[in-house]
Amino acid sequence: MSKLLSYIGMDGLNSRSRHLIVAVPWFWLVIFFILPFLFLLKISLSESQLAQPPYLDMIRGDGEGLLTIFINGANYLLLLQDSLYVSALLGSLKVAVISTALCLIIGYPMAYAIARAPESRRMPLLMLIVLPFWTSFLIRVYAWIGILKNNGLLNNLLLWLGLIDEPIDILYTPIAVYIGVVYSYLPFLILPLYATLVKLDNTLLEAAADLGCRPFKQFITVTLPLSMPGVIAGSMLVFIPVVGEFVIPDLLGGPNSLMIGKLLWTEFFSNKDWPMASALACVLLVALVVPFVLLRHYERRASEEGG
Amino acid sequence: MKIRFPWLVTVLLLGYAFLYIPIVSLIVYSFNESRLVTVWSRFSTKWYAELLHNDPLLSAAWLSIKIASINATLAVILGTLAALALVRFGKLRGSRSLGVMITAPLVMPEVMTGLSLLLLFIALEGVFGWPSGRGLTTIVLAHTTFSMAYVAVIVQSRLGSMDRSLEEAAMDLGATPVRVFFYITLPIISPALIAGWLLAFTLSMDDLVIANFVSGPGATTLPMMVYSSVRLGVSPQINALAAIIVVVVSIAVLIAAVILQRQAKNR
């Protein structure tokens, strides 16, 4: 009997305590994760004003007991019409796509090399990938300022090697943003990719080799397709946060580096236009729901294949 | 299986160089006497001494440590409950939606989480008068919401791979579910709890964007302090601070790795 019960849940634990275990984190997330988005949506539909709080309430009374609901779509209209916002959104997507591709180009061989390494060496090699992640993100981005500056390490090295005659501008250009993004998000791609590559069935590769398949073709026809769940999961883990990235374009990109996260920050903190910032966040959310649904889909497929 | 292709080793080495050169350069230049961060003059520890007398920075660091500790503890409790709910009571009402909600904060851009939580706190304050103002409480609430997701993922995988027969044996010997949890389940999943606590602590210590949205004028965390000083220009003091953080974190991660490895061997 206890065996049977243990399949349902913890034996003997009455249903009230079981419900409580589900309910506590459930209510926390509803209050601090779902509810905030409803407020975001609400404020994105209200009018901004120069006061505290800097927006007009949607439901306003006229003093005689009549309440009117004001819905203001002007923020969204402006988003569509003003080329600044459109190009910021497109700019963010572009940076995210290129960075994800760069992370794949650099990260795939690394994940592959770690997965093919002798078993005793895999853990230390992975630890080396994760270790930088534990030290402050902000400080690691800041470190690149010292490297990419005109009189920084990289330019000095290139000058010393004789590859260039005078310092080249790297900091405050899009290249600096790509370097910073790839550097910061590389571990997010390598870890899930490693997890799929390490589970790869070697007999398939041996079979391909026995049938006369050369290593490169083995990789293209066997390894690459089988590692797709890891490629997609890793790419999403890079792509989604990069679209909303603020710190990297702010510190490494120039004043003209247009990304939606930075624009939202400016609208909120400098222009104090809360409804506009909220509208931007809502657009960002919609732009990210599609990749997120894809991620869930592939995660489920990967776990089904793995289990 | 051996690495068959020498170029894979090369790629790996270049990759590690890419990951570590910025950190190493920070540490090296923290011992540079010159105010110009990338021009080496001579060895000096004066920036460390200056750091010790930088009171605003120290109090920001202390606030961050307080927030990170409370956050990590709350996140471990909530994350473990969520993991239990998902692994053990998957069929219960709310478990499915909990599963979706718990993974969403992992990938949500920080600017969105920060902005939406601020709007919630303002609305709550307007209706209930709580939380009054913004500072430690609101930052902890915000950090817990996203770091409990990380804890849940870690604990979930540990719970999923754990051998249930010990729990069943204890149950058959008449132990109550609560006793079984505290004497059997908790010790078995404790490495995951430690890893989760450390991760939640680090995430909180590291967060600039969300904290900036949900903190008030009175509360400045360490990343907010670092951010504002970095914006004013590169400062050698920040190099010294970075070096300290790198050394402390490396030691902590090494200790954690040794503990986890010993536990894995003992089983």
Image: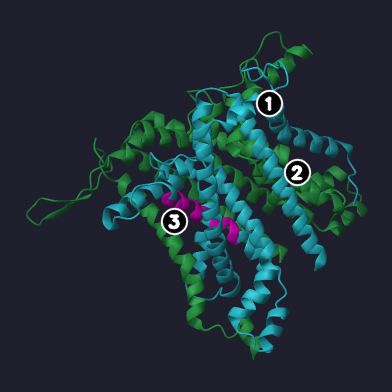
Instruction: Tell me how the rendering is colored.
Output: by chain
Q: Amino acid at mark 2?
A: Leu
Q: Position of residue A75 (x, y in %)?
A: 31, 39
CA neighbours of label 2 inside 10 A, class few (<14), some (14 to 19), many (20+): some
The answer to whether residue A205 is above or below residue A44 is: below
Q: Amino acid at mark 1?
A: Thr
Q: Position of residue B74 (x, y in %)?
A: 52, 60
Q: Can residue A295 be seen here?
A: yes
* Chain that is coloured green in the picture: A
Q: Colour of chain B?
A: cyan
Name the residue: 58% across, 51% down. Answer: B201
Which sits in the foreground, B140 or A199?
Answer: B140
Query: Which residue was labeled with disc 1?
Result: B45
Q: Can residue A10 be seen here?
A: no
Gap between marks 1 and 3, in whole Å?
45 Å
**Magenta region:** B137-152
CA neighbours of label 3 inside 10 A, class few (<14), some (14 to 19), many (20+): many
Gap between marks 1 and 2, in whole Å?
28 Å
Contact between marks 1 and 3 (CB within 8 A): the answer is: no
Q: Chain of mark 2?
A: A
The answer to whether residue A167 is above or below residue A282 is: above
Is B42 left or right of A299, judged from the image as shown?
A: right
Is B123 left or right of B214, judged from the image as shown?
A: left
Query: Which residue was labeled with disc 2?
Result: A128
